[in-house]
Amino acid sequence: MATLQQTIRFDNAYADVFSFSVGNGVSEHHLMIHVRNPLLAFKQQVEAIDNAFSALREQQLNGAVAVFKRYFLSDAANQADYIVASDFSGCALSVIQQPPLDGTKVALWVYMQTGMTCKATENGLYECKHGQYRHLWGGSAHNLAANSEYQTRLLLNEYVMQLIHEGCKLADNCIRTWYFVNDTDLNYGGMVRARNQVFFTQGLNHDSHFIASTGIGGRQADTNVLVQMDSYAIDGIKPDQVYFLYAQSHLNRTSDYGVSFERGTYVQYGDRRHVFISGTASINNKGMIMFPGDVIQQTHRMLENVETLLKEADCSFEDVGPMIVYLRDMADYNVVKNIYDKLFNGKSYIIVNAPVCRQEWLIEMECMAIKDISDSRFQAL
């Protein structure tokens, strides 16, 4: 087994690359590609990122295919159409306005794997298959219903039908979701109500389980789109391959304050463990916001919460690949970046402007970890 974290520089871009390989099995790579020169025009910045991705795919990561991509944009109204028209990588594609806070207009997260047979399904999901598992990715799902509650209900109902078409169920197969809410202070509550209602109809509740998730600020080009959903499900997994993380010494159950997502989830394969940490903020095990108004203390408490969730999955930050950090106030960027650079020198992360669901939360983060294991009960990835 080998885990490698490296930074590769190009003319106008650089890529933080987290790679995991084990024996002859599937190799995995997370790329966080940034623009080096913020003075470039938008199309030049996109070209710099595209050139970096192409070089990595054809050279260092030859044989790996993209299974999921997310573009972080500074101005979706003027940029999103160009991204969608110019990206030909043929994988699940998420495009969202969450401005990178390093002063650039665009950044890109790419998840790549080897040995996968990939195709678009008839119902709009993107399938990547290896062995007994089919990984089903969805990106940029949205509609134009009247409000955030109706939009979310339609999104989830359509997703339930997509999964049924693939022989899957929301409760059994969906591992991770992302909800990007246009104006969280106004529209987050509607998203939560709809998700609670649909989950109840699908057997997802406090006594069963929920789904790892991030609900955060973000918008599309069309201001009438109030909620965008990205998703990840796995066909071929068994119930005892999926575990839920609670970190009860530090966090409470989300249902205690009326929302329905898991703090974290991990999936056990025969040769590795995938850990998905949901959007996590500065909160305690009573559901109270810790250190209101102090982004430094909130950052450290948030990291402590994430570390505790990882520990429950027998992991640490050493096993973490990409980290996405969300800031409500862009003026906090330099302070938070300084903390991350000191604690995580050389690791892959991006800091974007995206308000968290409660106004008092100044910062939130999510991440994914991969750990080498051997479990004869299950097939390898």
Image (cartoon, grey):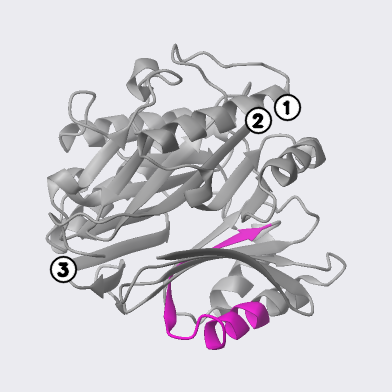
Kindly identify the residue that appears in the image at 11 percent across and 60 percent down: 167
The part of the chain drawn in magenta is 50-73
Q: Which mark is residue 296?
A: 1
Kind of residue at disc 1: Ile
Q: Is residue 58 magenta?
A: yes
- Circles 2 and 1, Cβ within 8 Å, touching? The answer is yes
Left or right? Give the position of 236 relative to 18. left
Residue 316 appears in the rendering: yes
Instruction: For label 2, count other residues whose C-alpha is less than 10 Å away and answer few (under 14), some (14-19) or many (20+).
Output: many
On the image, the x and y values in percent for residue 63 come to: 43, 85
Kindly identify the residue that appears in the image at 15 percent across and 62 percent down: 165
Left or right? Give the position of 170 relative to 232. left
On the image, the x and y values in percent for residue 20 come to: 44, 65
Question: Looking at the image, is 365 positioned above or below residue 168?
Answer: above
Instruction: For label 3, count other residues whose C-alpha is less than 10 Å away and answer few (under 14), some (14-19) or many (20+).
Output: few
On the image, the x and y values in percent for residue 189 come to: 45, 28
Kindly identify the residue that appears in the image at 27 percent across and 53 percent down: 159
Residue 179, located in which quarter of the rendered image? top left
Q: Which mark is residue 141?
A: none
Question: In the rendered image, which residue does mark 2 sit on?
Answer: 299
Residue 32 appears in the rendering: no
Question: In the rendered image, which residue does mark 3 sit on?
Answer: 132
Kind of residue at disc 3: Gln
